[in-house]
Amino acid sequence: MGSKTNPSGHRGRRPLSIFVVLALCCFFYLLGAWQRSGSGKGDYLALNVNKMMTDCTVLPNLSFESHHNDVEIVEPSEPKAKVFKPCDVKYRDYTPCQEQDRAMTFPRENMIYRERHCPAENEKLHCLIPAPEGYTTPFPWPKSRDYAYYANVPYKSLTVEKAVQNWVQFQGNVFKFPGGGTMFPQGADAYIDELASVIPIADGSVRTALDTGCGVASWGAYLLKRNVLAMSFAPKDNHEAQVQFALERGVPAVIGVLGSIRLPYPSRAFDMAQCSRCLIPWTSNEGIYLMEVDRVLRPGGYWILSGPPINWKTYYQTWKRTKEDLKAEQTKIEELAESLCWEKKYEKGDIAIWRKKINSESCKRKSSNLCDLANADDVWYQKMETCKTPLPEITNKNEVAGGELKKFPARLFAVPPRIAQGNVAGVTAKSYQEDNKLWKKHVNAYKRMNQLIGTTRYRNVMDMNAGLGGFAAALDSQKSWVMNVVPTIADNTLGVVYERGLIGIYHDWCEGFSTYPRTYDLIHANGLFSLYRGKCNLEDILLEMDRILRPEGAIIIRDEVDVLNKVKKIVGGMRWNAKMVDHEDGPLVPEKILVAVKEYWVATTKKNSSNEE
């Protein structure tokens, strides 16, 4: 069937259509060229758009939330951040798991009542612990070793109780710490000099130390200038604020006691341990306390005892004990030490020193009652047992059980024996070195964000999820020390931390930490909130961080962006100035960093209230 259109007419209109299209193209081309030449208004608009995109001040209320002008939103899509109010002024020195009222409900035997007893979930405080009125940033190190502001730790009882022993003196508005101690009346330096005549303190062989019953930690304070880090502990008892004074001085310390529970440290951790009139009953309970010290003392390590019953012939009347009683006690200690393969190296005056043998071949233990070596680091709320911790096996009689450590500071970055021997799951010598490089990079980035990091402004530092100790190692300086916390639900790496010559402790962050409020200047948390997601309330962890952080102290939290968004919302109701920044490798990395500074505010003296000054 034929077409009804005229083929010749169709061909006649095609050139005209092509001409019109070409003319329009030329017109728009010329119009665009005219605008780009700077003569048209389009350039003005383009410049303003570009300026808005590059000049942050143009949109001061910049928000990434969606805006819908055609719908009135009565309630926000998500609830506002909860605002945390200040706690009552009576809680200014609140220590959740070592509160006196709760402690007195527990048995007195074996110091059980002085151990950790944490509040139930419905008893936890959900408020901000206030600083005392007049609180002042502590003196910078090393002046803080010798002085502390009275307003920060307003307790004078020790200045009276220990007046003749030169623990602490009150002068005007400050406390002075002369460096004395019950068993070192000539001062801590003279005491350490005598120890150094037997123990190789000066050459880096001894780096980590444990002070059981530390008082105000003068022993640890004076060891620091000899490049020895002491972990000091004392109970929260009638000697008010011992540990609080120690931390105010800038010396590592925790609230703790040798009671019925294992110490929160790994086996073979310390190079040296001491009891200076610590009044621990070493011969009680079949020697269980000496066995616990043996567990945490590394092969070749030293134990120092100064005080009862050493030098009992001189002091038996002062101690109100009989000669027979004291002689029997020292004899029992000597027998226990021998059964633990400790060799007595020194006794003169008030001091006795033993050294632990380097392996089991050099001393056959007299008791077959050995603990399970596989559980030597399982300590959290675990009861102490009257058994001896066996040493790792060796291949020759001159070998140090568990591996020989390099002298400090080479020890800090050398491959730790626990890693070299394959005892840390998933960690090799190569991955350990890579971890060190990564943390050097991270710490350099932190210093660019906060130029006070690495200065004396941040003396007491905590790493809440320490891993292999890379953060502390990268930060290592005489100006600061780091409490490396290994969470009880994380991989057990605390033994590696100690082999590096660093100190730390096990802890469960669903509970309060064993310290007083306002005892840390800088707190670092890497992956902590992801680790505890679903385990306990993030709010509780953040409130605990606020409790132990000093006013105007700093926080660095590194975690996944979705977790940090939740953290940032909670922080919005706290007295922190916080912001989230990108990973040092750029915005495409899902890991972000939250940096914050705690505001300065103190309690008022008004009854049952506390507000900002």
Image (cartoon, rainbow, N blue to C red):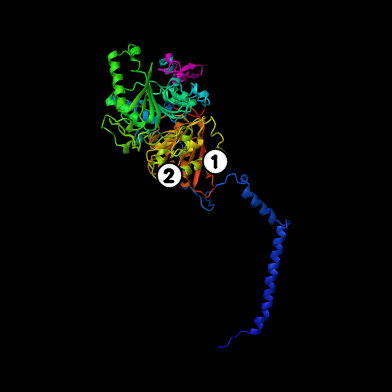
Please state the horizontal and vertical placement of residue 142, each as a whole percent of the image: 52, 25
Quadrant for the N terminus, please. bottom right
For badge 2, the amino acid type reads Thr
Give the class, few, some or many, for how many residues have Cα within 10 Å of label 2's Cα (few <14, many ≥20).
some
The reply to whether residue 112 is in sight is: no
Instruction: Return the residue nearer the eye: 488 or 321.
Output: 321
Task: Answer above or below: position of 563 versus 544.
Answer: below
Badge nearest the viewer, 2 or 1: 2
Q: Earlier in the sequence, mark 2 or mark 1?
A: 2
For badge 1, the amino acid type reads Ala
Task: Read off the magenta span.
Answer: 164-191
Residue identified by numbered label 1: 445
Residue identified by numbered label 2: 428
Instruction: Return the residue nearer the eye: 389 or 299.
Output: 299
In the image, residue 382 lies in the stretch drawn in magenta: no
Which corner quadrant of the image does residue 43 belong to? Answer: bottom right
Please state the horizontal and vertical placement of residue 138, each as a whole percent of the image: 51, 26
Asked which secondary structure carries label 2, the reply is: loop
In the image, residue 173 lies in the stretch drawn in magenta: yes
Give the class, few, some or many, for how many residues have Cα within 10 Å of label 1's Cα (few <14, many ≥20).
some
Q: Which residue does the image show at 48% across and 17% down from the upper left?
A: 170
Asked which secondary structure carries label 1, the reply is: helix
